[in-house]
Image (spheres, rainbow, N blue to C red):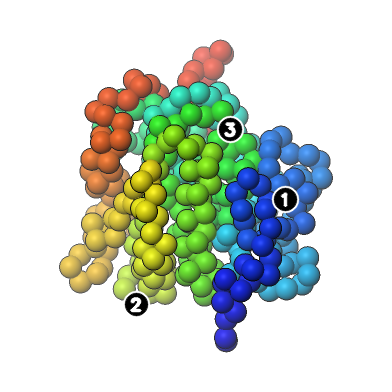
Amino acid sequence: MKRTPLFSLLSLCLATASALDYPCITAEPQKTGWPLTDEERAYVLKPEFERRPGSEQAKHQPTLWPVVPSAGSWGGTSWIDTHSRLVEYVKANAGPVDVLLVGDSITQQWGSPLDSGELNEAWKKHFGGYKTINIGIGGDKAQNVLWRLDHGGVEGLQPRVVVVMIGNNNMFFAPETGVEAAAKGAQLVVANVREKFPLAEVIAAKILPCHAPGNLFYENIKRTNAALDALSLGADSHVHVLDLWRDFLNADGTLIQKLFKPDNIHLSPEGYGLYSERLKPLLGRLLGPVGLGGDVVIPARKDNRRFPL
């Protein structure tokens, strides 16, 4: 099927949805801010496919999906409730932080208030001296992260470094959207973070490999990372691209199995150990060997229980 070039669709739909230019305005009633109005909450509780760009005109415009903010959906209120918990977590930690982690489940599994509330062993070992805030949500795509960033997801934080890894879940839709659009979605997440935190340094980690050579997911990740290279994120002196692709592969391109869980997507403790080793020189250069000294992600609540689990 012949695809309409992405830039043609962007020119047809160009508008400003917030301070950051997004390529299309949807019918969403509240483009930014938190808390949500009743009207916005009703809108985001619709299935995500009903809110995609072009849906109002019954137009199929998949190349716009990764580049226009959209709340996620797991059915019912589960996703928005999860985002709400992270908003409260961010409020409780407002102010200066060393590291802000942004992404999907691979980021969430560094240690999150959505899980045990504890940093994983690799992060504690290598970066325990840095005050770290993690807003990763499993299953998120670039468009979901864009929405969260614009709807209270980082409000009040003052990070010194932001680590972004996003795009894996966009691969489920890459046969429709194309890999260039998926890469552009990741680029916009970085641009959003740069706009919100102009004094922060951003580490943009390219998508990790998964599955096996010849698998469509594997090949589309490889193509998306190449498309990210073409976008020259590192041309901004405050953006530092981290390419981990070869670190996680054998010479023949297959996954180094000990670095992955059995699903061949998520990382094992050894995988996070390697990720830490590759991240450490960058964080050390940007932050110094010791951060603000906050080695606890989640402060104790007044009733002595950890912040929401």
- State the residue at coordinates (75%, 52%): 28
Residues at discs 1 and 3 in contact (Cβ within 8 Å): no
One can see residue 117 in this view: no
**Front residue of this view, candidates 117 and 55:** 55
Q: Which mark is residue 214?
A: 2
Which of pointers 1 and 3 lies earlier in the amino acid sequence?
1
The span from disc 2 to disc 3 (Cα, nearest Å) is: 42 Å
Q: Position of residue 269 (x, y in %)?
A: 29, 45
Kind of residue at badge 1: Val
Look at mark 1 in the image and give the residue it sits on.
44
Discs 1/3, front: 3
One can see residue 12 in this view: yes
Kind of residue at badge 2: Gly
Up/down of 253 relative to 71, above or below: below
The span from disc 2 to disc 1 (Cα, nearest Å) is: 36 Å
Few, some or many residues within 10 Å of mark 2 (<14, 14–19, 20+): few
Few, some or many residues within 10 Å of mark 1 (<14, 14–19, 20+): many
